Image (spheres, rainbow, N blue to C red):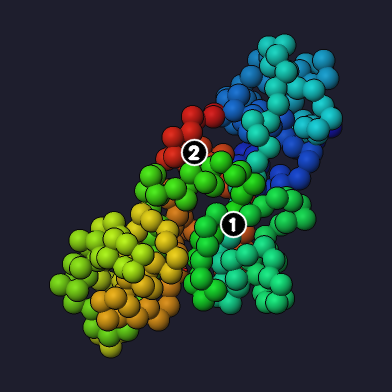
Amino acid sequence: MTVEANTDSSADDTNDERIVPLRLQKFLSRAGIASRRGSENLMTAGRVTVNGEMVRELGTKIDPLVDIVCVDGKPVSLRDGNIYVMLHKPAGYLTTMNDPQGRPTVASLVPVEQYPGLFPVGRLDCDTTGLLLFCTDGELAQRLLHPKYHVSKRYEAMVDGRLFEQEADILRKGITLDDGPCNPAEIIVESSGFVSRVTCIISEGRKRQVKRMFSAIGHPVLSLHRASFGVLSLGDLPVGEWRELTDNEVNALRAVVEFEKES
Ligand code: URA
């Protein structure tokens, strides 16, 4: 356990704590004990001990692998130790952690050495840009990808040719592709001309689904970008950069797929 001179609790809202040691209040919220603010309150109320010593200083950092943290005398451990990261995927990277042919992969863009076991949740085509979620949490990933939970994905596409509303209606009703019928998609034709700009929201994640949907109505996709995945949005995350999800984002994702809320 170490005590930092800077006790500014607002610093906890940043993602600057990707490695141990971890701020005690962040540890408590990750363990599902309370929100970050609630954890601070527990600390200042004198209900938290580290290695048997009461800790009230909000700048205290602990090593979750070494220090023994208790709240009201009960030991606390991280709920699962999982890590969740979003990447703004650039074009030209394969969604795989290892390519035997040595082509560029998303593995080179996320902190795999710091967080061993990270894997992508679903995939984006090599030329698709946008939000790609990574985590070490197999169960959550499985649920997020399961069709039963209808996790929505919002894509921004440029498609070839003038796209008419009647054509978009085919996708809105749910087009049938060679691997079966698609759920109705939400389609917003943003502009239409020699090429058309479209927002497309789908609740499935079949292989090359958006491209196949638009090809099927005669408007091949020229470029594709995923702006959101479930409750997650890229925001202003620069291309090629990653960030850890906030606790709120993780809890919101978990709620969508019916995990119990953890803080
Ligand atoms: N649909 C596609 O066609 N490609 C992607 O990369 C993602 C969704």
Image check: 32 left or right of 111?
left
Q: Residue at x 37, y 68 (%)?
A: 210
| Disc 2 element | helix
* Amino acid type of the residue tagged 1 in the rendering: Pro
Q: Is residue 186 visible?
A: no
Image position of 61 with respect to 218: above or below = above
| Dot placed on the residue nearer the N-terminal end, 2 or 1 | 1
Q: Nearer the viewer, residue 62 or 217?
A: 217
- What x and y, as percent, mark residue 127? 51, 76
Q: Is residue 17 visible?
A: yes
* Whether label 2 touches label 1, CB < 8 Å: no
- What x and y, as percent, mark residue 226? 45, 64
> In front: mark 2 or mark 1?
1
* Amino acid type of the residue tagged 2 in the rendering: Arg
Image position of 109 with respect to 143: above or below = below
The residue under label 1 is 120
Image mark for residue 254: 2
Image check: 218 left or right of 43?
left
